[in-house]
Amino acid sequence: MARTNGGIIGKSNKTSFGKCTVTAHTSSGCKTLQPGTRVVSVLVVAGGGGGSGGVGSGGGAGAGGLKTSENLSACGTIPVIVGAGGSSSSNSCVSAPKGNQSKFNACASNEIVTCGGGGGGGYFSAGGVPSANLNGGSGGGTGGDQEYTAGTGICGQGNPGAPARTPGNVGLWASGGGGASQAGQQGRGGNPANPAYGGPGGAGSPVTSIFGSAPQPFYIANSPTAGATACGHFAGGGAGGSYPGAPAYGTTSSAGGIGGGGNGGDGGNNPGLAGVANTGGGGGGAGDAPGCDVAKPGGNGGSGTVMIKELNKASGMWSMKSQFSSKQQGTWPATTFIEATGGNAVVTCGSFKTHIFTASGNFEVTSSASSPTLNTVDYFVVAGGAGGSAQQSGGGGAGGFRMSNSLGLPGPTTSPLANPSGLAVSVQTYSVTVGGGGGGAPGTTPTPRSGGGNDSVFSTITSTGGGAAGGGNNCGSPLRTGSPGGSGGGASWGDDAYNPPSLGTAAGGTGNTPPVSPPQGNNGGASGIGCNAYGGGGGGAGTAGGTPAPSTSAGGDGSFIADAFVGPTAPSYGTAGPVGSTRYFAGGGAGRPRAGTPETAAGGFGGGGNNPGCAGTTNTGGGGGSANSGTGGTGGPGIVMIRYQYQA
């Protein structure tokens, strides 16, 4: 027995090595599980029903049915069906369409099926009868002129909607659809002291106990027109439409249920709002106004989702041979995670922790994880930006921008400059250097170059300080090029007496110096030609610096990290930019624009200083802006962040 079982007698082990990987499916298809996965936990949410509209206040729709199941046996390829939301209706005589089913492991013996949410009930101003469409995973709420029973929910998947009114109780406001954890609610008529409102949608259900505390990259972002979702809730009911009763009473829009339920239309004859995509939220019902017989739609139901968590599990008796094989393959279940100290702030987001250094210090790994794959950290290292120059001169180059994304942050909110490979760490102390910003050049004649930014360093990653801006000349000295750096500094202009137009422009400093891949920055902007041509903008991590004509010497834009890299404190770091749910860093400082144009210019997104003479934003690595007179803006100091998984 010892020879065949490695010295241990017992049952065969039943194990799963899914590494707690979570996949959120937003459309139908197949999920191929990891080779070692044998056990999963699952969330299945169907599409929410459509909200009702027409010429009166329409009922809010029910949420799609919601089911969770833990510790299911699964392996190989799993078929997944994600149900679409029900479409809205503009016909007040019928209920809106239901949502569609979602399925996990479709057609198998252990498939999990959830039913689409019930549609919102029509106003029925022309008469009619309740429709089977009201019933669903969660039931739809009734329209404003109904005394009928609201839609029913399915036990274990959702809750009923609410009736708009009870017999003998006059009221023309509609009711809310049911949600996964709460029934829909009735509305209220208006009076001189209080506005009317339709019935709010029933609350959805949180899934954080299975998939981790919010925020998580696979939870849906909040929408201002529906119930909150980023907290890890799904399947909120749609709100009913409002009706004021009298114009003077006023009305307000009712809220959809937490978990993506669409808000109801207010009493200004406005349409209902849609449930949030991939939450299963019900659509909101349309509102009504006295004497207004114009048809308007309800809101569409939100599509469903299927979320799969591949688990780490070990049961039964392990043989020595099995243990040795699993250790060799790196599939032994992880029981410990990195423990570390250091930084000016430490924040958590879901199962991840980020140490933030706004000044130099130490990152000390006090305990390593039991799995090599968990001993990897992601880094974000931004160097100090260069100062801006003065007179008719260039903006400071941004500090180098380097980061990794090996821990699965979402692509749309993660910089294209991210390295897909993180850094392996071990138990030791790592010195962290946060580079300071360079000083601005004084407004003397001629003006010298500004001060370059200083390097930031973590482990083997060095981001180079921003390149200095070329000095101003005031029509009295040769052209001055920008200096190289993480991103290059902007060049200054020169006097025709020294540099006739035939000699062309001075070049901006070269970015990504020394070269790394992905690149850490871009070139600074070139100068104009001849006297009064002025200087170029400093380069940024995302784009090169502008030139005096035609781009008005703007600083180059920086690049960005996902809010989830920093967690709930994201607004405290970096700046806003064009990509939502991100923070920008390493923007170039503005140069001085060409004479005859507005003599101001903008620094790049990510903390680049504006012209005239504004400093780069603190701890963004932004370059300083050039000054038209006086001293150029100082460069922004850099920043270092280190992110790793600290719990399952």
Image (spheres, grey):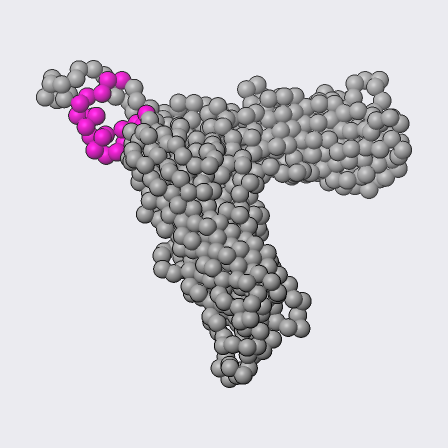
Query: Quick check: is 333 in the magenta stretch?
Result: yes
Residue 19 pos. (x, y %): 35, 31
For the C terminus, the quadrant is top left
Residue at (50% x, 43% y) in the render: 562
In magenta, the rendered stretch is 316-335
Residue furthest top as drawn: 10
> Can I make out residue 340 in this image?
yes
In the displayed structure, 566 sits above or below 637; it is above
For the N terminus, the quadrant is top left
Residue 634 pos. (x, y %): 53, 55
Residue 383 pos. (x, y %): 44, 51
State the image quarter where residue 615 is shown.
bottom right
- Residue in front for this viewpoint, 305 or 499: 499
State the image quarter where residue 21 is shown.
top left
Residue at (62% x, 29% y) in the render: 258
Residue 635 pos. (x, y %): 51, 54
Residue furthest left as drawn: 3
Residue at (11% x, 18% y) in the render: 2
